[in-house]
Image (cartoon, helix red, strand yellow):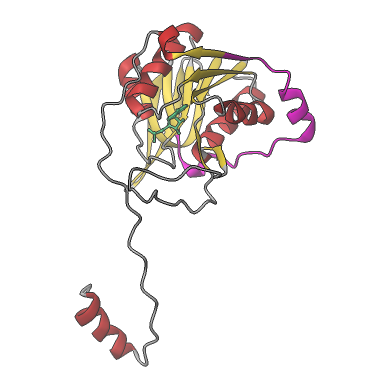
């Protein structure tokens, strides 16, 4: 079985992002970038399936600028086998990513695609669902457990009311939630080995997909700054403030 893992290059989760003064977006100059954390979980899950003898090959794919190769290399250093970079120099929306992934799926013919549930830059939570719809494949989103059994995959999903378990017929699309696993760090030997692993480069034109944006960003603004806290003298004063100032009681 071949597993395809899409990995996105995003602003590192430790970075406090700054909005550009003209409100057109987030300032990315000299900002540390990293693999989307949910995609690290996706790579880790694919590695565990391979180590359990349930997958033979893990291919990672990123749609993005030349620098997205670093994200692919990180996944290769964790243990993935090879990479594909779909060069796109403009930001790509989830529908464009899903179309590019559909074209990669047609070439690579994986049995399972494991994506992150959402990218922490746009917080869209759309790509996996769109990809499943475009492919006509079943989907198991927000996975906290993934079990392959012959022709099916059983996915435990984290939903608002608790856990839901679904059984999907392969090939299928799965998206990862936080509790699925704890991703490994790449070891030094693996980092060295990863430099020799193959990475193919292609473009949207070569894949025959249109990545033109469909959405127009009107304005980006930072959330309002939080006011300082106050100390209250008694529970009665707290209740009074919650009722009469915060209006939450
Ligand atoms: P989103 O729908 O944008 O929140 O992204 C959900 C998931 O889709 C991510 O966790 C990635 O697995 C995948 N994805 C989104 N954008 C890209 C991209 N440019 N390249 C590769 N994978 C992506």
> What residue appears at the point 41 percent right and 23 percent down from the top-left corner?
173
Examine the rendered structure and indicate whether residue 141 appears above or below residue 162.
Answer: above
Q: Quadrant of residue 26?
A: top left
**Whole-percent x, y for residue 105 in the image:** 45, 12
Taking depth in this image into account, of 38 and 245 the one nearest to the observer is 245
The answer to whether residue 225 of the structure is visible from this angle is yes
**Whole-percent x, y for residue 12 in the image:** 54, 44
Taking depth in this image into account, of 209 and 7 the one nearest to the observer is 209
Examine the rendered structure and indicate whether residue 90 appears above or below residue 232.
Answer: above
Q: Which residues are magenta?
A: 176-200
> What residue appears at the point 66 percent right and 31 percent down from the top-left corner?
78
Taking depth in this image into account, of 100 and 248 the one nearest to the observer is 100
The image quadrant where one finds the C terminus is bottom left
Judge whether residue 188 is colored magenta: yes
Q: Quadrant of residue 166?
A: top left
Looking at the image, how many numbered discs can be counted on the residues? 0
Give the left or right position of residue 195, taking residue 207 as reference. Answer: right
Q: Which corner quadrant of the figure contains ligand 1?
A: top left
Q: Quadrant of residue 88?
A: top left
**Whole-percent x, y for residue 107 in the image:** 48, 7
**Whole-percent x, y for residue 72 in the image:** 59, 26
The answer to whether residue 55 of the structure is visible from this angle is no
Examine the rendered structure and indicate whether residue 178 appears above or below residue 209.
Answer: below
The residue at the far bottom in this view is 233
Judge whether residue 240 is colored magenta: no
The image quadrant where one finds the N terminus is top right
């Amino acid at each position: 079985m071949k597993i395809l893992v899409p990995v996105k290059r995003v602003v590192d989760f430790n970075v406090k992002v700054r909005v550009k003064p003209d409100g057109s977006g987030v300032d990315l100059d000299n900002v540390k970038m990293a693999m989307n954390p949910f995609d690290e979980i996706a790579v880790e899950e694919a590695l565990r399936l391979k180590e359990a003898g349930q997958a033979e090959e893990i291919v990672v794919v990123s749609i993005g600028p030349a620098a997205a190769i670093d994200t692919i290399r990180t996944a290769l250093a964790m243990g993935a086998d090879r990479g594909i970079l779909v060069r796109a120099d403009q930001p790509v929306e989830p529908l464009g990513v899903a179309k590019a992934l559909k074209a990669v799926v047609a070439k690579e013919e994986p049995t399972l695609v494991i994506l992150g549930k959402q990218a922490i830059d746009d917080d869209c939570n759309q790509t996996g669902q769109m990809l499943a719809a475009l492919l006509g494949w079943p989907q198991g989103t927000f996975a906290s457990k993934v079990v392959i059994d012959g022709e099916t995959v059983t996915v435990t999903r984290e939903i608002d009311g608790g856990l839901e378990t679904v059984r999907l017929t392969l090939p299928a699309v799965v998206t990862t939630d936080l509790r699925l696993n704890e991703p490994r760090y790449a070891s030094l030997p693996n980092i060295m080995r990863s430099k020799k692993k193959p990475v193919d480069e292609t473009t949207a034109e070569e894949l025959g997909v249109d990545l033109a944006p469909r959405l127009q960003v009107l304005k980006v603004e930072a959330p309002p700054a939080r006011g300082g806290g106050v100390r209250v003298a008694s529970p009665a004063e707290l209740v009074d403030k919650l009722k009469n100032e915060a209006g939450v009681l």
